[in-house]
Amino acid sequence: VYAGLLVLTAYGFVTSPTGFIPDQDQGYVLVNVELPDAASVQRTNDVIAKLERIALQTPGVKRTMAVAGFSAFFQCDSSNWGTIFVVLQDFERRTTRE
């Protein structure tokens, strides 16, 4: 039984895809921002604005939406957290021949 499980595990590793699959690509990325404890929401907003500018200059990014003072990962509010929702262009427009 143990040898059979090892063979099935090896088969799974060999046949599983190793990168993003277009069908599973949802077209967005969540970015979590965490500043030091007790950082003001204004300081968090400044950092988020810088990160948004960087994201919008990245090829394949369509738009962004940011929220300072809220973490989508932890589902709670705090002045030192922020979340950026990065919306990507369609998968076909994000690929190159290279």
Image (tube, rainbow, N blue to C red):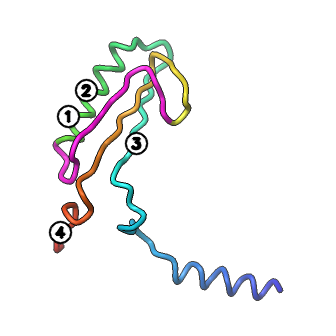
Q: From the viewer's side, name the closer residue of 35 and 53.
A: 53
**Is label 2 in a helix, a strand or a loop?**
helix
Q: Are marks 2 and 1 in contact (CB under 8 Å)?
A: yes
Q: From the viewer's side, name the closer residue of 90 and 10.
A: 90
**Is label 3 in a helix, a strand or a loop?**
strand
Query: Which one is closest to the eye, mark 1 or mark 3?
Result: 3
Name the residue beneath numbered marker 1: 53
Vertical position of residue 78 compared to residue 96: above or below: above
Q: CA distance from mark 2 to mark 1?
A: 6 Å
Name the residue beneath numbered marker 3: 30
At x 27%, y 37%, the residue is 64
Q: Horizontally, is 6 left or right of 23 in the view?
A: right
**Is label 4 in a helix, a strand or a loop?**
loop
Q: Are marks 2 and 4 in contact (CB under 8 Å)?
A: no
| Residue 51 at x, y percent in the picture | 27, 33
Q: Amino acid at mark 3?
A: Leu
Span highlighted in magenta in the image:
57-72
| Residue 11 at x, y percent in the picture | 60, 85
Q: CA distance from mark 1 to mark 3?
A: 15 Å
Of the residues under marks 3 and 4, which one precedes in the sequence?
3
Q: Horizontally, is 77 left or right of 56 in the view?
A: right
Quadrant holding the N terminus: bottom right
Q: Horizontally, is 54 left or right of 4 in the view?
A: left
Q: What is the number of the mark on residue 49?
A: 2
Name the residue beneath numbered marker 4: 96
Q: What is the number of the mark on residue 62?
A: none
Q: Residues within 10 Å of mark 4 (few under 14, many from 20)?
A: few
Q: Amino acid at mark 2?
A: Ala
Which residue is at the far right?
Answer: 1
Q: CA distance from mark 1 to mark 4?
A: 23 Å
| Residue 41 at x, y percent in the picture | 39, 14
